[in-house]
Image (cartoon, helix red, strand yellow):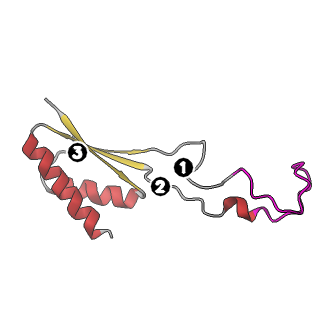
Amino acid sequence: MTDYVLRMYDTLAHAERARSALLAAGYSADQVQIEAMNSEAGPVAGNFTVGNSSDRSDHSGIGDSGDYRENFKGVRQGAIIKLTVAVESDSRHAQANEVLDRVDTSMT
């Protein structure tokens, strides 16, 4: 029975490094999948379209004289790359986690 190991990464480079480590450890390319989880809806955290208008705004949305840069302050896109490893046994599941833990530790 196939089981899965799942990790989420903030950058494609980090996910690709993890994938390369798994391939070097003997996992096949078919077992290790990377998927971008971006959404056209925008970032998962932040204040990207709502609020933060200045006290100088008439809140009409037209001719706002306020500094709207605050709307984009603190926006971050996190955990947007999903890495999935298909494993066939408990020992391979544990090994995949060990490989990924080493990669994650080396990236910090």
Mark 3 secondary-structure assignment: loop
Q: Classify residue 23 as left or right of residue 39.
A: left
Q: Position of residue 51 (x, y in %)?
A: 74, 53
**Which of marks 3 and 1 precedes in the sequence?**
3
Q: Classify residue 79 as left or right of residue 77.
A: left
Q: Amino acid at mark 3?
A: Ala
Q: Nearer the viewer, mark 2 or mark 3?
A: 2
Asked if residue 64 lies in the magenta stretch, the reply is: yes
Residue under pointer 2: 78
**Which of marks 3 and 2 precedes in the sequence?**
3
Q: Which range is magenta? A: 49-68
Q: Position of residue 62 (x, y in %)?
A: 91, 50
* Whether residue 57 is situated above or below residue 42 in the rendered picture: below
Residue under pointer 3: 29
Q: Are marks 2 and 1 in contact (CB under 8 Å)?
A: yes
Labelled disc at residue 68: none
**Which of marks 1 and 2 precedes in the sequence?**
1
Give the residue displayed 75% in from the left and 58% down from the top.
52
Magenta stretch prevailing secondary structure: loop
Q: Classify residue 102 as left or right of residue 56.
A: left
Q: Classify residue 3 as left or right of residue 9.
A: left
Residue under pointer 1: 44
Q: Position of residue 32 (x, y in %)?
A: 25, 45
Residue 30 visible here: no
Q: Amino acid at mark 2?
A: Gly
Give the residue displayed 87% in from the left and 49% down from the top.
61
